[in-house]
Image (cartoon, rainbow, N blue to C red):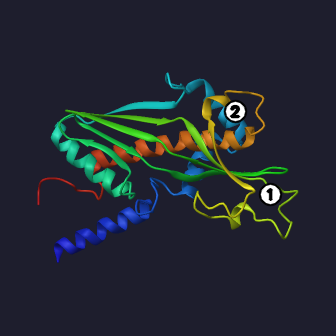
Amino acid sequence: MKRITYIILALGFMMAAGFLSTNAQVIKKADLEKYAKEKYGSKWLDAAQNLAPSISFDKNQSLTYREVIELPGKTKEQLYVALNYWVTATFKDNSAITLNDKEAGCIIVSTTIEDIAEHTGTLNRYAVSITPVIRFDIKDGKIRVTYTVQNYDILEDISGGWLTVAAADQKTLGDSKRKQDDKTNPRLYNEQWEIAKHYPFVEKDAQKRTCAKALVMTHAYSNALIDKLEEAMKNGIVGGDDDEW
């Protein structure tokens, strides 16, 4: 009975935190946007411009963040077990974990975070998703997190702008939740935009409003991910995750 109670409490905690979403929702979309606005401001163009000097790209022109979480007193094996528990609870996509090497102390996760930004322009409407590659390297007393995103994944609806959205015979983005290979609406396109080639890294950008919010939300997600990982590694996923039982 006691064990069942612990399981129910654990599931309740993970649902409240957004861990049981079908995607890698470390934080719910609405909460992530609120977090981003509180941390960086509600004006996306200004927020993206302010963030730009602190953001670096790797040799592949991918947006990359790296942070070391210090966990003194924890062995590599202890951290490996705890990190596996957190990764499994957080990333529900069965194919999200692309590498799990205990001996090397390395776990790599890659999964899509859907609709981090949407924007309706004059003629077109865009929905932006990202697929970050998140690498966890483990040593005694520390975990290094490397978070990399190269592109924005774009669903562009050329019939979804505010001048065209009212046409009765045209599907809009909201009506077109379909599989990628569904070609029933020729007005929809799937594209990839290289982050380094868009606003705020390129000033003259036709998609600057879309990319401004996408950048801020991408940055905010990386911070939320690391914050939640650090909290879980220090205090346990459900609290009281220790050897005294």
Which element carries disc 1, helix, strand or loop?
A: loop
Q: Residue furthest bottom?
A: 1
Q: Nearer the viewer, residue 90 or 153?
A: 153
Q: Nearer the viewer, residue 45 or 199?
A: 199
The earlier-in-sequence mark between 1 and 2 is 1
Left or right: 107 with respect to 31?
Answer: left
Left or right: 238 with respect to 35?
Answer: left
Which element carries disc 2, helix, strand or loop?
A: loop
**Quadrant where the image shows the N terminus:** bottom left
Q: Residues within 10 Å of mark 1 (few under 14, many from 20)?
A: many
Q: Which dot, 1 or 2, sits closer to the camera?
A: 1
Residue depicted at 41% across the width and 63% down the height: 20
Left or right: 15 with respect to 196?
Answer: left
Measured as percent of width and height from the top left, residue 167 is found at: 86, 66
Measured as percent of width and height from the top left, residue 180 is found at: 58, 57
Residue depicted at 71% across the width and 35% down the height: 46
**Which residue carries the number 2 mark?**
199
Among the 4 quarters of the image, the one containing residue 182: bottom right
What's the amino acid at mark 1? Ser
Marks 1 and 2 sit apart, C-alpha to C-alpha, by: 24 Å
**Which residue carries the number 1 mark?**
159
| One can see residue 197 in this view | yes
Left or right: 139 with respect to 28?
Answer: left
Instruction: Relative to 212, say whether 2 is above or below.
Output: below
Measured as percent of width and height from the top left, residue 53 is found at: 60, 24
Residue depicted at 44% across the width and 53% down the height: 26
What's the amino acid at mark 2? Tyr
Q: Nearer the viewer, residue 158 or 33?
A: 158
Measured as percent of width and height from the top left, residue 82 is found at: 24, 48
Q: Nearer the viewer, residue 196 or 159?
A: 159
Instruction: Relative to 125, say whether 214 is above or below.
Output: above
Residue depicted at 23% across the width and 73% down the height: 5
